[in-house]
Image: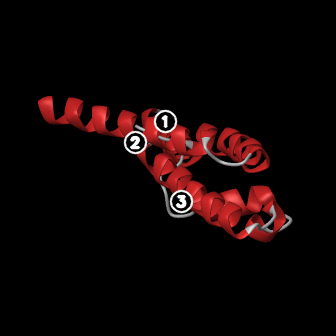
Amino acid sequence: MLERIRTLMEEKGEYRRQLARAAALPERYRQSFEALQQYLWPCAAGDGRDVLEAQGELLDLMEEGAAEGRTLPELTGEDVAGFCDSLLQGRRLWIEDQARKTNRRIAKRRNHT
C-alpha cells in the first residue's frame, strides 16, 4: 500500500512538472499543447500513466520545435488527431478497457442463458 502511495505521489509530481514545462512554452505552442492535451487525456485508462508518458513525449517535441522555430504542422503533420493517436499507439487506453469489459459482460450473459 505504501509503495502505491509513493508511486501516485511521484506521478502527481511528474504531472505538475509537465504542466510547468507547458506553461514555459511560447504562447502558440502552449495553446497547441493544451488543445492536444484535451485530446489525449480522455483516452487514459487505469491510472493514466501511459497518457502521462505520451504527454511527456509531446512536451519534448513541442520544446524542441519551439527552440528550432518550427510550426505545429511541421511537428504533427496536417492530421493532428492522427498524430495524437500515434502517440497513444501501444499504450493502455480507456476505449480498449471498455471493449474488454463489454466483451466479458456479453460472454457472461451468453453463458448464463
Reading the image, the residue beneath label 2 is 14
Q: Please give the name of the residue rendered at 70% of the width and 70% of the height, measured from the top-left corner.
A: 68
Q: Is residue 104 visible in the rendered structure shown here? A: no
Residue type indicated by callout 1: Arg
- Left or right placement of residue 110 versus residue 6 in this view: right
Residue 16 screen position, x and y as percent: 46, 35
- Nearer mark to the viewer, of 1 and 3: 3
Reading the image, the residue beneath label 3 is 57
Q: Please give the name of the residue rendered at 79% of the width and 61% of the height, measured from the top-left corner.
A: 72
> How far apart in space, not on screen, are marks 1 and 3 (Cα)?
35 Å
Label 3 secondary element = helix
Q: Nearer the viewer, residue 20 or 42?
A: 20
The quarter holding residue 79 reads: bottom right
Label 2 crowd bin: few (<14), some (14–19), many (20+), radius 10 Å: some
Reading the image, the residue beneath label 1 is 105
Residue type indicated by callout 3: Glu
Earlier-in-chain disc, 1 versus 3? 3
Residue 38 screen position, x and y as percent: 69, 38
Q: Nearer the viewer, residue 66 or 101?
A: 66
